[in-house]
Amino acid sequence: MRRTLQLLAAAALVIPALVGSASAVAQSQQQLPQSQQIGTEESVSIGLGGSAKSTTVERPGSGYVKLHFTNVRLMKGDVLTVSNPDGTEKYTYTRDLKSSLTATIDSTGFWAMSISGEKAVVTVTSPFSRAKIDKLARGYTAAEMSDQVSTQSICGTNDYKDAVCYQTSNPAEFTKSKSVAKLLRNGSSLCTAWRVGANNRLLTNNHCFTSTTGIEVWFNYQCPTCGGTATAPVTKVLAAQVLKTNAALDYTLFSVNNFAAISSFGFLELDARVPAVGEEMYVIGHPAGKLKKVSLKDGAGNCVVRAVRVNGSSSQSDISYMCDTEGGSSGSPVLSRRTHKVIGLHHFGGCPNQGVRIDLVAASIGPLL
């Protein structure tokens, strides 16, 4: 997420803006990935069963609550439900947990899907069923989050905006944003991911995860009004299988459970070429875990590719740009404004920020799409 300045960085930074596509650009500063911690885990002891058929778990100011259950003994036909207070987000679990699309099973019990907001309501339908909540993960409060986020990848003034702000002025960019999702990793950290192609395929960074255990994928986590704070209804699914992952190119290709639930959000296409220096581009993601943002502007002008064949996780593997990002932007698609197809997979921050060249990724994953 952060870049550590080195002694000769100031002189080296003058060079990349005009570098042609045939040149390799060495990193002038140390790059670090842009994943982001957004929550914490804590131990609790809350029993369910008998006269206690329902309980509410509240963590004031948290953006989500995710519960872990142990000692689960559900009667045949009984259901354990985890929901928000008004029931608009609800997940149900039966004694057949292995068939659940929203449970992450571990050696002591299972993690339920997270509930957005500061309250989770848990109920069992029979007084003879039993369950215990032994731990939970919850989102940081606004005050806690402010201590976590670095602004070193905000290049000058912060120019990213809510995706919906571009619905009228830039309808193509807005439409493409629908295919981008927030990743919640093990209940406490995040990255960004996106649908690639029409099949059950999504892309993010290798440094975001290499195993699907505990990975939630949130679609439509965005604001319905420009500059607002409300959240549109969110569709959550669990990551199902890692199809291919590569540390040198920093990508993970994966599938999800319940693909039908997210098929309506559309998909992005790969533009398997080395982009031109000066080509206009944009980044879509969830910087610092925020509602979906589009980074289209760079100061007074539009974002452009600053350099190509920049050293990243591998030699000459990256492109660079000054579009604003933050921790949590890792895995975001970098799109050309000319083709509205993906030319990079964002993974490094620090101004200039960097994305893996999608032509290299496409050559590696093409047969799997």
Image (cartoon, rainbow, N blue to C red):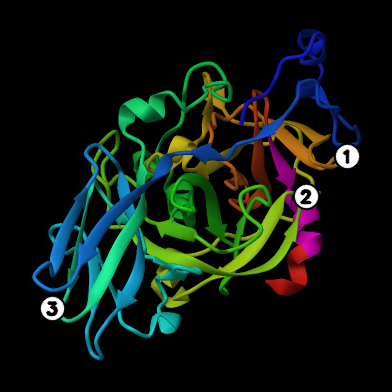
Q: Please, what secondary structure does the residue beneath circle 1 have?
A: loop
Question: In the rendering, at what x and y percent does residue 165 appear?
Answer: 35, 38
The label shown at residue 127 is 3
Q: Residue furthest left?
A: 51
The label shown at residue 125 is none
Residue 161 falls inside the magenta stretch: no
Q: Which residue is drawn at 13% across and 70% down?
A: 53
Question: In the rendering, at what x and y percent does residue 320 appear?
Answer: 71, 32
Mark 1 or 3 closer to N-term? 3
Q: Is residue 353 above or below residue 65?
A: above
Question: In this orientation, which residue lies closer to the viewer: 153 or 284?
Answer: 153
Q: Please, what secondary structure does the residue beneath circle 2 have?
A: loop
Residue topped by disc 1: 315
Question: In this orientation, which residue lies closer to the viewer: 124 or 118?
Answer: 124
Amino acid at dot 1:
Ser
Crowd band around label 2 with a 10 angstrom C-alpha radius: few (<14), some (14–19), many (20+): many
Amino acid at dot 2:
Leu
Q: Residue at x 41, y 58 (%)?
A: 219
Q: Residue at x 17, y 69 (%)?
A: 123
The span picked out in magenta is 354-364
Can residue 336 be seen in the rendering of this structure? no
Residue topped by disc 2: 249
Give the label, 2 or 3, closer to the camera. 3
Crowd band around label 1 with a 10 angstrom C-alpha radius: few (<14), some (14–19), many (20+): some
Describe residue 147's horizontal placement relative to residue 229 as left or right: right
Q: Please, what secondary structure does the residue beneath circle 3 have?
A: loop
The alpha-carbon separation of the residues under discs 2 and 1 comes to 10 Å
Amino acid at dot 3:
Pro
Can residue 349 be seen in the rendering of this structure? yes
